[in-house]
Image: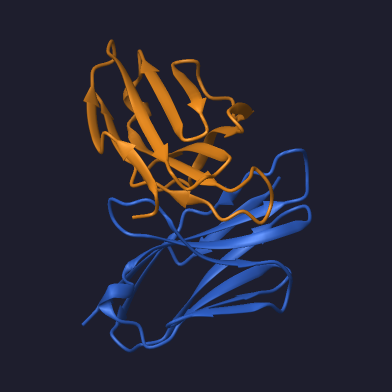
Chain colours: A orange, B blue
Amino acid sequence: ETGVTQTPRHLVMGMTNKKSLKCEQHLGHNAMYWYKQSAKKPLELMFVYSLEERVENNSVPSRFSPECPNSSHLFLHLHTLQPEDSALYLCASSQEWAWDTEAFFGQGTRLTVV
Amino acid sequence: EDQVTQSPEALRLQEGESSSLNCSYTVSGLRGLFWYRQDPGKGPEFLFTLYSAGEEKEKERLKATLTKKESFLHITAPKPEDSATYLCAVQGYGGATNKLIFGTGTLLAVQP
């Protein structure tokens, strides 16, 4: 265990559904991240929160909506997704949003959009 | 634009057969190069950070090296438990972002 926990591990949702992914870390880290991992593609950074403030938004469609209520929790709210959004969604945390920062990843949520 | 290319895409080794994985990068000023290991159905696990050409780091059967254009992950006498996808990422000084740029990984299979 890395100290970063994601739920659920697997999620199947229809294109009209609304669901949320949850991430929790108890490492005392100040930065949290959402990544998307698709087959044969590099990990793609989606959002970064530093001290509960969003500092990075990599042109992610508005059907993905992040929320960081406190430094230990991160959510990714999903609505009206498309089949191409099916992927492994990874949460990570690090001590700071800075260089030389080892990121700790969760196990991921395998999302399938039908 | 910062870019990372990993080769080969997949590598199959016999137990004990040493080899190397390659990570070529283009970055506007390297802050750090990171190696991660990812097992199926799991998130990446941090292995090493390298900062400057000539630097080397070791962990058990793994040794990572860095030049100005590429990094190698050498695997000495691998065991089946070393089977995983190995990811390389770079962080550069260019722009205002601190984000990591990942490669697509090398899938390593070590057969007993």
**Residue B40: percent from left, percent from top:** 28, 55
Taking depth in this image into account, of A69 and B31 the one nearest to the observer is A69
Location of residue A106 with respect to A80 vertically, above or below: below
User: Which residue shows up at 52% across the image and 54% down it?
Assistant: B103
Q: Relative to residue B42, is residue B74 drawn left or right? A: right
Q: Quadrant of the N terminus of chain B?
A: top right
Q: Relative to residue A43, is residue A22 drawn left or right? A: left
Where is residue B105, by image quadrant? bottom left
Where is residue B79, by image quadrant? bottom left
Q: Quadrant of the C terminus of chain B?
A: bottom left
User: Which residue shows up at 47% across the image and 19% down it?
Assistant: A65
User: Which residue shows up at 34% across the image and 22% down it?
Assistant: A20
Taking depth in this image into account, of A58 and A29 the one nearest to the observer is A29
Where is residue B54, by image quadrant? bottom right
**Residue A61: percent from left, percent from top:** 50, 19
Location of residue B81 with respect to A76 vertically, above or below: below
**Residue A43: percent from left, percent from top:** 48, 45
Location of residue B106 with respect to B75 vertically, above or below: above
Count of residue discs? 0
**Residue A57: percent from left, percent from top:** 60, 27
Taking depth in this image into account, of B94 and A21 the one nearest to the observer is A21
